């Protein structure tokens, strides 16, 4: 089983998302959260997704507007589902994930030189 933590500092909510590969090739998804919106997202998503749901934007239930509409457009929970699933499927390196620890969105001021060059 692979798990990720989505730490939404802006709204002070956290989501622990776990993915486990099933014998039939689909993935069991579990979302534990302190956010009512993401609890409703989890209910809409259900406990199972397909590999296609996590590898193809078109038709993905993870990003389905009907399912995601209960959450803010800036919420990273759906990306957390994708990342947990990709870790479980071996599509992301577990060693590199442990080494880098996190991906993040940073807010920066206009004109700040805290941007990546190039």
Image (cartoon, rainbow, N blue to C red):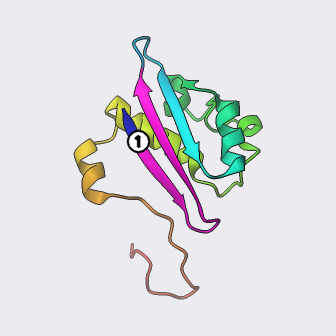
Q: Which residue is mark 1?
A: 3
Residue 103 seen in the figure: yes
Instruction: Give 82 or 33, whichever is nearer the viewer.
Output: 33
| Count of marks, rendered view | 1
Indicate the quadrant containing the N terminus: top left, top right, bottom left or bottom right.
Answer: top left
Task: Tell me where residue 77 appears, x and y as whole percent.
Answer: 58, 48
Task: Tell me where residue 6 appears, x and y as whole percent.
Answer: 50, 53
Residue displayed at 52% across by 22% down: 50
- For the magenta stretch, what is the residue range? 3-21
Assess disc 1: are there few (<14), some (14-19) or many (≥20) residues with their C-alpha within 10 Å of its C-alpha.
many
Task: Tell me where residue 92 appears, x and y as whole percent.
Answer: 33, 41
Q: Is residue 60 above or below residue 24?
A: below
Task: Tell me where residue 67 appears, x and y as whole percent.
Answer: 72, 36
Q: Secondary structure at mark 1?
A: strand
Residue 51 seen in the figure: no
On whether residue 16 falls in the magenta region, the answer is: yes
On whether residue 62 falls in the magenta region, the answer is: no
Q: Is residue 23 above or below residue 92?
A: above
Instruction: Give 18 or 69, whichever is nearer the viewer.
Output: 18
Residue displayed at 58% across by 85% down: 110
Outermost residue toward the top in this view: 24
Asked whether, in this view, residue 111 is left or right of residue 101, the answer is right
Residue displayed at 72% across by 48% down: 37
Our reading of the magenta stretch's main secondary structure is strand
Residue displayed at 33% across by 58% down: 101
């Amino acid at each position: 089983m692979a798990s990720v933590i989505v730490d939404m500092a802006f709204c002070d909510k956290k989501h622990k998302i776990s993915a486990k590969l099933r014998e039939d090739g689909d993935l069991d998804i579990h979302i534990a959260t302190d956010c009512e919106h993401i609890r409703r997202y989890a209910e809409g998503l259900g406990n199972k997704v397909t590999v296609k749901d996590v590898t193809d934007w078109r038709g993905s239930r993870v990003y389905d507007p009907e399912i995601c509409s209960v959450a803010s457009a800036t919420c990273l929970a759906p990306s957390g589902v994708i990342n947990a699933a990709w870790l479980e499927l071996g599509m992301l390196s577990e060693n590199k994930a442990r080494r880098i620890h996190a991906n993040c969105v940073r807010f920066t001021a206009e004109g700040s030189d805290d941007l990546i060059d190039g």
